[in-house]
Image (spheres, rainbow, N blue to C red):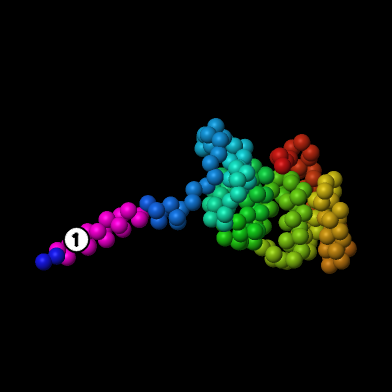
Amino acid sequence: MRSPRKPLLLLAFLALALIPVLARAQVTPPTAMDPALLAAANSGDAAAELKAGEACAAGNGAARDSRQLAADYRQAAVWYGKAAAQGNIPAQIHLADLYRDGRGVARDMAQAAAWYRKAAELGDPGAQGTLGILYSVGMGVPQDYLEAYFWLDLAAGVPGPNQARFITNRQSVGEHITTGQLSQIEDRVVAWKAAHPPGKSQLNR
């Protein structure tokens, strides 16, 4: 009589053989990066953590499928988060962008706005303008024309590629506030600039 254990043993062997193959199919490691950069990032250096995140997001130049892109952006979000927590402005903005777009993390406009605000409070005009726009439409934050005008006014006062757009947005928001409110915002802007003189800001974008 043929032993019934042989087919069972064969099936068990095949199942064990398939485990590594399935693991490779389900888990895609992030793009490899320069060992020196990785070592610096692992040591807690914020600038290296930022570059590590950017390396993951950019890839190594080779074509990436959707699974590889997802793995790379997840790792980028981890590195950006580490640098952002140390007050690195570009990392804070990159992390906000990932939350805004839902890349590497679940899309979360409240988280995006929170990280834009951190960068805005450190003096980044791009983050200030973006935060102002979010307040103007109530995305990720409650709609608040006073807050919107405040941040847009700060951003509009800094020369840059988005200055004209921030000026236009500020004018649109200004239609929703009174003269008295505008005076209060202007006083607040003056106080903010006095507390954040050029050179004291941590701008490094």
Q: Quadrant of the N terminus?
A: bottom left
Magenta range is 3-19
Image coords of residue 174 (percent x, y) = 85, 63
Is residue 88 found left or right of 181 in the rendered image? left
Image coords of residue 41 (percent x, y) = 55, 37
Q: Is residue 89 above or below residue 129?
A: above
Q: Amino acid at mark 1?
A: Lys
* Nearer to me, 144 or 89: 89
Whether residue 70 can be seen here: no
Q: Is residue 201 above or below residue 181?
A: above
State the image quarter where residue 90 is shown. top right
Image coords of residue 161 (percent x, y) = 82, 48
Q: Is residue 52 above or below residue 23?
A: above
Residue at image point 57% right, 56% down: 66
* Residue at the spot of label 1: 6
Residue at image point 66% right, 63% down: 140
* Nearer to me, 188 or 43: 43
* Nearer to me, 63 or 67: 63
Residue lying at the far left of the rendered structure: 1
- In the rendered image, residue 13 lying in the magenta stretch gets the answer yes
Name the main secondary structure of what is drawn in magenta: helix
Residue at image point 74% right, 62% down: 135
